Amino acid sequence: MQNRPFPWQDRPSGCQDVMWRYDANPIIDRYAIPTSNSIFNSAVVPFKDGYAGVFRCDNKAVQMNIFAGFSKDGINWDINHEPIVMQAGNTTMIDSDYKYDPRVVFIEDRYWITWCNGYHGPTIGIAYTFDFKEFFQCENAFLPFNRNGVLFPKKINGKYAMLSRPSDNGHTPFGDIYISYSPDMKYWGEHRCVMKATPFEDSAWQCTKIGAGPIPILTNEGWLMIYHGVITTCNGFRYAMGAALLDENEPDKVKYRTQPYILGPAVDYEMQGDVPNVVFPCAALHDTEEDKLAVYYGAADTVVALAFGKLSEVVQFTKENSL
Amino acid sequence: MQNRPFPWQDRPSGCQDVMWRYDANPIIDRYAIPTSNSIFNSAVVPFKDGYAGVFRCDNKAVQMNIFAGFSKDGINWDINHEPIVMQAGNTTMIDSDYKYDPRVVFIEDRYWITWCNGYHGPTIGIAYTFDFKEFFQCENAFLPFNRNGVLFPKKINGKYAMLSRPSDNGHTPFGDIYISYSPDMKYWGEHRCVMKATPFEDSAWQCTKIGAGPIPILTNEGWLMIYHGVITTCNGFRYAMGAALLDENEPDKVKYRTQPYILGPAVDYEMQGDVPNVVFPCAALHDTEEDKLAVYYGAADTVVALAFGKLSEVVQFTKENSL
Amino acid sequence: MQNRPFPWQDRPSGCQDVMWRYDANPIIDRYAIPTSNSIFNSAVVPFKDGYAGVFRCDNKAVQMNIFAGFSKDGINWDINHEPIVMQAGNTTMIDSDYKYDPRVVFIEDRYWITWCNGYHGPTIGIAYTFDFKEFFQCENAFLPFNRNGVLFPKKINGKYAMLSRPSDNGHTPFGDIYISYSPDMKYWGEHRCVMKATPFEDSAWQCTKIGAGPIPILTNEGWLMIYHGVITTCNGFRYAMGAALLDENEPDKVKYRTQPYILGPAVDYEMQGDVPNVVFPCAALHDTEEDKLAVYYGAADTVVALAFGKLSEVVQFTKENSL
Amino acid sequence: MQNRPFPWQDRPSGCQDVMWRYDANPIIDRYAIPTSNSIFNSAVVPFKDGYAGVFRCDNKAVQMNIFAGFSKDGINWDINHEPIVMQAGNTTMIDSDYKYDPRVVFIEDRYWITWCNGYHGPTIGIAYTFDFKEFFQCENAFLPFNRNGVLFPKKINGKYAMLSRPSDNGHTPFGDIYISYSPDMKYWGEHRCVMKATPFEDSAWQCTKIGAGPIPILTNEGWLMIYHGVITTCNGFRYAMGAALLDENEPDKVKYRTQPYILGPAVDYEMQGDVPNVVFPCAALHDTEEDKLAVYYGAADTVVALAFGKLSEVVQFTKENSL
Amino acid sequence: MQNRPFPWQDRPSGCQDVMWRYDANPIIDRYAIPTSNSIFNSAVVPFKDGYAGVFRCDNKAVQMNIFAGFSKDGINWDINHEPIVMQAGNTTMIDSDYKYDPRVVFIEDRYWITWCNGYHGPTIGIAYTFDFKEFFQCENAFLPFNRNGVLFPKKINGKYAMLSRPSDNGHTPFGDIYISYSPDMKYWGEHRCVMKATPFEDSAWQCTKIGAGPIPILTNEGWLMIYHGVITTCNGFRYAMGAALLDENEPDKVKYRTQPYILGPAVDYEMQGDVPNVVFPCAALHDTEEDKLAVYYGAADTVVALAFGKLSEVVQFTKENSL
Amino acid sequence: MQNRPFPWQDRPSGCQDVMWRYDANPIIDRYAIPTSNSIFNSAVVPFKDGYAGVFRCDNKAVQMNIFAGFSKDGINWDINHEPIVMQAGNTTMIDSDYKYDPRVVFIEDRYWITWCNGYHGPTIGIAYTFDFKEFFQCENAFLPFNRNGVLFPKKINGKYAMLSRPSDNGHTPFGDIYISYSPDMKYWGEHRCVMKATPFEDSAWQCTKIGAGPIPILTNEGWLMIYHGVITTCNGFRYAMGAALLDENEPDKVKYRTQPYILGPAVDYEMQGDVPNVVFPCAALHDTEEDKLAVYYGAADTVVALAFGKLSEVVQFTKENSL
């Protein structure tokens, strides 16, 4: 990550929040490619001397699909005009009624993509690529219904590890975060509950459901998991962003978890759009030496925005404001 | 329509969309008459040397009623401050708990108005006028519950023809477009299904329900029917606009139908208001020679806005982007 | 009806109810034909020197269809093993996804059958026959969604008249009785509300929904309309039977309507079956001279049963126990 | 109230509405104290030579609590950074899972605060203070579930009187205003229904539910009760403000009640926020001699705003626009 | 209770249950009075040399009302054919849309009746009588919505005490037992939560809602409160009977509570009727010396039945099978 | 299976159904062990010279657990009075809030039990035993929510294979049958959809949801899978039994599937009980030489019953009555 420019702005003077917004948000407009109705809930990863990404672009028929994109600086993006075409990976069954909410991570020798894959309802799709040109789709991780499948960036105790949220087939009104393990990215087991939606009285912004966001980041306090939480208002769901610290070797153990949110819908492009009041993080870049964290999030199910924080401060905030 | 000014703006440079918005939208403000809370979902028609219209004005008790209005240019409107008072037409039963979402069309010798009429729930009211001063209310077309009754501008096979959408008595979560015929504007029959809401995977923006919009326009590819489609997000309904081409003589036969929407909520006055994220077309003016189309639509259930397109391009777009 | 035997049993000694059950109920078992899962909600009519009937037989795939049957005495029935096949009547569009809950009536020169016809959801199907061998299907009376279409046995003011209940596409939790008129059994209009479900406090057994049952019977107090009413208990719907008297010439005027039910689910075959607690009348025979009334009703959505009353007493009871 | 500055702006020229907004709204920002996510639905009262208030501040965990605050001019406020801590008043049972939507009133010798108190669900909490430093919590007024408890500013027929709205334990989809009496602020009875949500046809903006707002103001036409009304749109609830006049000595008798709302969501900070489209009044200041009324209301469940009117005009408007 | 016969049958041989059924159940048939559709959920009390009772008789319009009745032996009952007519007691407001589920208790000098009273929805009605001929209706105890109001048979700490269950206005899918106090049977306060529905895993038969049944019985282990619990099956609610022991002086303190039910629907008249699978206790007689307990319960919302137990065994069972 | 008596009765004379009931049903009463409220949905398997079984016994607190039992003849059963206690198998995480609806199968060297296991909601629990005395619980097969996990009786293409039905956390109103594979009974993948609920018009008895029943039986037409199907009536769910034939080597391929049900609720113990109208098969014995099939099913969620058929006839019926 040495020579690669890191997307960054210092904290605005006067601001005392642990996270702050990029002042030129949104970084990707809803109409950034010709067919799109909205581009949001997308993932980025360091790639070569810049960055690659996998983007959720709903078209004007509101069909959901994922597209590859590239950037020198992590802020200005060229997104392909055609969706990713999958080849068969460790399976021949690569059915997909729709694809949305991707995450991307590099493990060992390749980039793994997970997403919400339509196979008789939503479940977790898995694919890998070496170059963001050819993509190889693997077995779905789970039976339907599931969303927000997020891989850890390295094996844990010799197994691949994935966070996910069991769901139903609609606008799921519940949802907790689980972890599952696999020896081979094909068969999954050892399912454990990690973290639940909270009682209303304890922390209402995350009382309806929660779901993992970016790839977890290893810190000296354990895995930093940024996630989204949802409250049901009388006018629907409101999505905000929180953080948790999971034990490094037993990541189903939650060490700390923010009682307050760390970023909630409060500016125009978050409060207004196809689904008002949504802040939905899907990816993060970090530079431990420079103590920088950049979180990519979907805003109002319409655009992509960027928020910044000091990595050490986010960890500290999580410890000091824990449930 | 020769000497009458046609409301129009050329496509903005750089815009590649098939439809574009009037840059002084909204053309009618929510408070345009003293009693109004909102003015939207309204209809206009050429009249004398200008235009007449029937406007849905909800008052500050949020009671729904329809009002006559007049304009020289189709953009600047004088709307009566009192709602339309009905006299008895082909019936003495002219009960009406409320009136909303009018359409207007000239057939043979008079102007016909249809609207959503409150008679033990919503159904389709019918009235005619010669002068937009005296209005004669006729038998309701159907039993409750129905909405979006839209007449064809001429008889088909010797019968009046009406599109409509069977509904329920609430915020109907389903709805398809039907056609019915009448020899006399009093008795209705020969009900046929024209077009259904789409499977989510095929075209999600119109997967919850659909309803006819402006009076259909006869083109050399058949009847151009502009309509609204609805998707259910986790924060409620989102209304967008599409187009279809129906067979000239058998209008229950759909020849083409847009998979993408042609205009969706994306600017402030469409995304913010009494019901956010609503684009609801109810009327259209066209000039075939000049190849101009002007669509009037309700925005956010609050104001009236105007969008333009080239008639031939809309037809072409519908054929080339058909489901 | 002279030589034809009338199905009858005198009131049991000690019984003071206005209606009483046949002591060999149910008269038709659920498995009376080889394919049937249940036979219920069916209609009978005098025919030649005996009776003909149209029967709802759901098969073991629980597909709904109607079957012709014949009887000498109105009690013992031979039901065809194959469903009725329709020919085209006053239309060529005779689509039917399913057929259920038939009614039969003789008017002028032929027998008319109405039923709940599956055409994009339930609506009212119409057919006629002269001989119960050949059946001619006509235009559906209404747009979906509708159920319980019941014709009057003669024209009223020169028009055919039909009772019906606007519905939705599921287990409708509401429903009132309307009347509509037609000059020709093809086009229907002049829709009027006849009678609504009652406020809970006034008569709770009919507070969820109501629907017309047998063909109305002309008495010197007007039309006797036997109908079903539904209450929603914490364990689902409960259907019982009531009676009303409608004005002879203006049948949307209700003269009397029973506050209490006249027969409710209280014996084994009514309280136990595919849908417990259902008494659903669909047909009635009467002999004015002998002062006899025999009502056929579906019990527990499973079998057909029979109840008797003195016609004059039912009329008197309706007048004396009116809402 | 003599020397105390009254928060006020004259009606803008051209404005013909009975109420108008303060042009520097919102007066309190969502982040006005360090922990807050939103500050809204709050109450103020004259205190010493300025004003005191009790503010609903939801923190960034979206936990609801009430905070004291002080102001010289009623517009610029210093809100404590710590919530109110209660001591025991006429009870030892001062359980409270959460506190929200406070009202404040001075009666006889002290200030009484009522609020929505979490005790096995929402009910009405009561406390008193002499100095806004020490607070004494009393018995809850009612069993759960209840909201919007509002005291009258003096005893009526020798008893304390409280308006309230029986509710359920969620986003209650119904709700009417009742009055109850107490000899001692501990035992409550003589419950009477004051005013119901309206039939949709009569006044739709208040057809889902209603609730009392500020402390009623005694005028020579009786008690002026400003209240909120709710309509259910297809995208959720919309809250607006109305007014009623209650009989001075028998306040369960409604003399007048506005059919139109007097202020509805129509500007940015009302239409956009954590819950879009909410105008929720909780407090009012008035100066009868100067004929001034200032209403504090929560906007979009996010901020506090201020609206003004002439007291005599609001009374007159209520009489002339009554249901 | 000396000379008065106690309704009783010894435990059948072989039976090992703590409660057993009367072998001639049901003791009161659904049609026991001429107008009744069902007689259930009713209360009895020793009176003179026999027993008096207040009975819920729904008529054939399914209107709910309460009727007085008398018995020599507690098993054979004469129920009045006319409902109880109320005179004004400590109030003039004795509105009542309906009355159901009565309880009766003697305190000091008179018999008090509580019931579910229809006043803008269900709440708790109160009346007293000295002779079961004249009845004096008092102030409703609470605001709507409430059900299952049950008085203690003596004052506790100098106040009247009542159990009740806050509810909603439908087939309430939740509900816990509370206690409230009153100095004068007019004003009520000091509301405390006594006992909640259980987590599904702990005791599923009572996991949807619970409600107090007969008047609590003072034992040397505290107040024996027999109550009903409800589970939601995929076919609706199922009501069974349990028991709890409350502290004598602080009855909001639960000492013991049965994890298993003590009587559940298992015989014909409990599993079949207007609402299948309901056992609903409303009254109990006991004879401490003879160690006898007789519980009256409504079965299937249709009839009245009787179950017996040894008082000491029920207390012992409650202690030994406590949650 | 040679010397072991097979539970059997020949088809009753006159019966033409493909399956018939044992005339001494139910074979296990709801109170067969002291603590039980109901015993149903249970599994049996040949064991030593008789049979072993795993039984769902809900206790009188309606807590669900599984119990071992033994029988010489498959009809008369001794069920242990204490539930099965699990030891750790291929995992140490053997949490279980509840256990219900077991299936049992012998594979290679041991008996495997699957059941609906409560781990943050229902999922599929797995255990093995060699002797029905010691039981070893393994990793749950899937994330929540899932029900009706049924193993094949031998490996397919070298992998264990399991049918299951993804569900939600309530009375799931949807549900299709899937298959998944595992190399080691610990990690699961290769999830494929096998068979879906049917459109209402095609076969209504199975239009709400379906779920696998007994262990599939290998026939020369492929795997015979007996399953349950559900229809939603206006009074709740109705469960009946059907059959399908799956390809021997690719069991996600459905060769045949009965359009009609093969056994539906029609006798007292099926139509009346804790959940009326339930026939729920969980186990089957077969003797290919003798051409006998015996199916164990839960009736009305209350008791265990037995039905018989000729194996070849059931296969033939499935082929001839296929959807």
Image (tube, coloured by chain):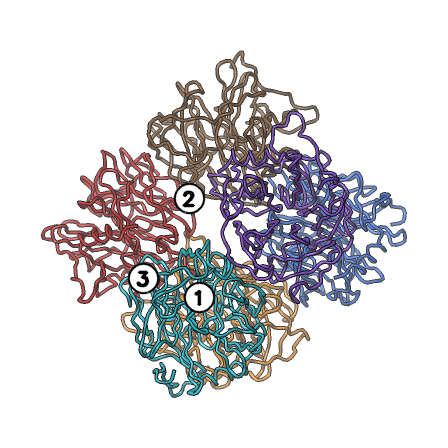
Chain colours: A red, B orange, C blue, D cyan, E purple, F brown
Q: Quadrant of the C terminus of chain F?
A: top right
- Up-down: is B52 above or below C222? below
- Up-down: is A81 above or below B306? above
- Closest to the camera, between mark 3 and mark 1, is 1
Q: CA distance from mark 2 to mark 3?
A: 32 Å
Most foreground residue, B83 or F38: F38
Label 2: how many Cα within 10 Å (few below 14, some 14–19, many 20+): some
User: Is residue B57 at all visible to an observer of this figure?
Assistant: no
- Closest to the camera, between mark 1 and mark 2, is 1
The residue that mark 3 highlights is A265
The residue that mark 1 highlights is D114
Where in the figure is residue B6, as x and y percent of width and height? 41, 80
- Up-down: is F169 above or below D91? above
Spot the residue most to the left: A3
Where in the figure is residue D87, as x and y percent of width and height? 38, 60
Most foreground residue, E177 or A142: E177
The residue that mark 2 highlights is A120
- Up-down: is B116 above or below A145? below
Spot the residue most to the top: F3
- Same chain shared by disc 2 and disc 3: yes
- Label 2 SS: loop
Q: CA distance from mark 1 to mark 2?
A: 52 Å
Amino acid type of the residue that numbered disc 2 sits on in the rendered structure: His
- Label 3 SS: loop
The residue drawn where x is 20% and y is 58% is: A308
